[in-house]
Amino acid sequence: MEALLPVLQRHPGLSVLVCALMFRVAHRLLQNLPVPKVVAVDDFRSWKWRNLSVSMVHSLLTGTWAVTCVFIWPEMATNIHSFYTAPAYILICISSGYFVQDAGDIILTGHARGSWEFLIHHVLVLWCFLYSLYSHLYVAGAVVALFVEVNSVTLHLRLMLKLASQQSSPLYQINKFLNVFTYVVFRLSAQFYLTYYIVQNYSWMDKGGYFLITMTLMNTMILIYFYRLLRADFFPRSRPSMALNGTHYNNVKKFLTD
């Protein structure tokens, strides 16, 4: 990894595009795997399943990688401004490539309007990650931010089970509790820790204002989503038939995002 680092640092933009291409190849390969029948017969569900499959690969890879980095180099949690290692820098390249690929997939397949929240999230993440890759600052902070991907594993599994109409399955019931646990421990905790760090060190941090605004927007989004998650899984409301008045497509999308 040490030998690869200088190459990536000389061409960070190209490195991100190569990683995006790798995730696109993964997207193509994952299409060869079997899918549930209820998913295969619906165009939106089929696209969402493929999209989530790539997201799951990203979350499993980067979530594990991020936690391992901080475990091996604890200074990443205390010096998020300037400390980094070759594995950490490479991790941010790979993750940035995923977000580029996913944004492209959403836009080019015509799902931008129904997935605008994800696009806003991706833009905010990419702004921070690309700044880290070009400036070599806040790489450790980006690694800590990727702790959220541990929770993303359970979030993606939740949506895939919903796509397969398995909300009554034991796996879904177990996962919904794991989802809340990982949301608090890995997503909320990581985000709030980074926000606290920026506030405490704001006076001397490079681009502190930009990062504080970004974190505030991200925190608002994840708190809203956490509320929606709790409401949907633990305090569900009765839903009208999804086939009424020709609104099946829009209701399926709302059903999957709740």
Image (cartoon, grey):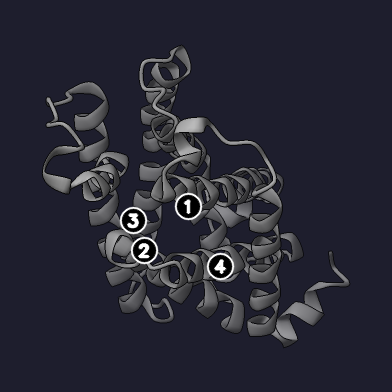
Q: Percent x, y for residue 189?
A: 39, 43
Q: Percent x, y for residue 67?
A: 61, 44
Dots 4 and 2: beta carbons under 8 Å? no
Q: Which residue is mark 2?
A: 111
Please name the amino acid that badge 1 sits on: Trp
Quadrant location of residue 137? bottom right
Q: Earlier in the sequence, mark 2 or mark 3?
A: 2
Q: Secondary structure at mark 4?
A: helix
Dots 4 and 3: beta carbons under 8 Å? no
Q: Which residue is mark 1?
A: 47
Please name the amino acid that badge 3 sits on: Tyr
Q: Which mark is residue 101?
A: 4
What residue sits 16% from the left and 31% below the top?
241
User: Between tags 4 and 3, which lies in front?
Assistant: 4
Please name the amino acid that badge 2 sits on: His
Q: Nearer the viewer, residue 142 or 21?
A: 21
Question: How far apart are labels 4 and 2 at the CA level?
Answer: 14 Å
